[in-house]
Image (cartoon, rainbow, N blue to C red):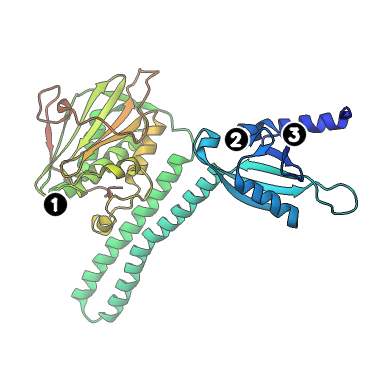
Amino acid sequence: MHPEPTIEQLLARRLVDLMDPAVVVVDVDEAVVLANPAARALGIVRGTRLLVPELLHVVRDVRDGGSRRADVALPGDLVGSGPRLVGVHGVRLESGPAPVPGPVALVLQDVTEARRVEEVRRDFVANVGHELKTPVGALALLAEAVQDAADDPETVQRFAARMSHEADRLARLVRELIDLSRLQGGDPLPELAPVDVDTVLHEAADRTGLAAAAKRIDLVVGGEQGLVVRGVEAQLTTAVTNLLANAVHYSPEGTRIAVAARARSGFAEIAVTDSGIGIPREDRSRVFERFYRVDQSRASSTGGTGLGLAIVKHVASNHGGSVTVWSEEGLGSTFTLRIPLAGSPGTEPAPAGAPDAAPADELLPGASGPGSPTSVASTAGGPTEGRT
């Protein structure tokens, strides 16, 4: 017959049950004598059995040598929500002056998200370092070449032009890093104002017109006219500019790029369609990640930073919208930016980065439908961006 638990024991058990971390106590026979609700929710305990062999290894190590910390991966079939990573702290619970074998307590904390954030941070730092290395290294080599060619003004001028190009590339990377940091910072948008979608489309087309003309690409603007959204015009223009610049870089010479808008289900849909190389199916879910490029070998030739589509995603999200992509290898891509129309509350955007439907004919300038296409010939270039 077991004695009645004391008030202190009942309070201790109640406190353990209320703890957010999972707590499991295992006796000398490796039977579970206590498991709080958090531990049972993880699925690591069944009756008096500890189901994860790695946790039993921690128990034995603790019993042999004292306190121990370790990360243990829990299978998804136990947790029910996919594999999880837990940080485990094990301690011996001996009583009395002699260090006799006794129970072992395991405290488990879900660290899946924390480790993911650490990995993202490491990747981000590594990617920034890689992107900075190219222009900085080029500037160093060009500066050395200028010194060696000090007596040849023509050579100095040629190298100076290349140095200016690399400096612009470096400045663009820094600027886009700052822009992305602000967009991800969670700061509220400036006061929203009515934004004319036609103005956004034509300004973005003007910014990319010079790059398109250099490749004899016909850049056309069309779709419905007179659409108005509420937002920050500068950010929306940057987003559409990035989509157009991305399309220009990955379209063959002599092709056509279309940007058009339409109203649909309370949103202004802005579609940018190209006839470029397309995106492999396995890469489509990642194209909006920072620094991700489908074809790394084209990164230097396009001059992009790998941040343009990430900026588009966050501009869309901050405006209560989304951006999606439809693509087929060898046929091209359509990126669709959805922003709520002014006076259309309660609309639900598609998940950011979700695959889009095939480009609709009515969105393409030149097809039957509202609005007439406008061919853009620009004398002002804009930011360039590699297809992420």
Classify 10 Å Cα crowding around label 1: few (below 14), some (14-19), many (20 and above).
few
Quarter holding residue 315: top left
Front-most of residues 140 and 15: 15
Q: Is residue 104 above or below residue 358?
A: below
- Amino acid type for the residue under numbered disc 3: Val
Q: Find residue 221 and report its horizontal and vertical position in percent.
A: 16, 33
Q: Is mark 1 on a helix, strand or loop?
A: helix
Q: How far apart are marks 1 and 3 (CA)?
A: 69 Å
Q: Are marks 2 and 3 in contact (CB under 8 Å)?
A: no
- Amino acid type for the residue under numbered disc 1: Ala
Q: Find residue 4 and report its horizontal and vertical position in percent.
A: 88, 27
Front-most of residues 214 and 322: 322
The residue under the point 34% across, 49% down is 292
The reply to whether residue 67 is in sight is no
Classify 10 Å Cα crowding around label 3: few (below 14), some (14-19), many (20 and above).
some
Q: Are marks 1 and 3 in contact (CB under 8 Å)?
A: no
Q: How far apart are marks 2 and 3 (CA)?
A: 15 Å
Q: How far apart are marks 2 and 1 (CA)?
A: 59 Å
Q: What element carries label 2?
A: loop
Classify 10 Å Cα crowding around label 2: few (below 14), some (14-19), many (20 and above).
some
Mark 2 and mark 1 lie on one chain; the one further toward the N terminus is 2
Q: Is residue 255 above or below residue 346?
A: below
66 sits left or right of 160 in the view:
right
Q: Mark 2 highlights which residue? A: 42
Q: Is mark 3 on a helix, strand or loop?
A: helix
What is the number of the mark on residue 150?
none
Q: Mark 3 highlights which residue? A: 16
Q: Mark 1 highlights which residue? A: 214
Disc tally is 3
Mark 1 and mark 3 lie on one chain; the one further toward the N terminus is 3
Mark 2 and mark 3 lie on one chain; the one further toward the N terminus is 3
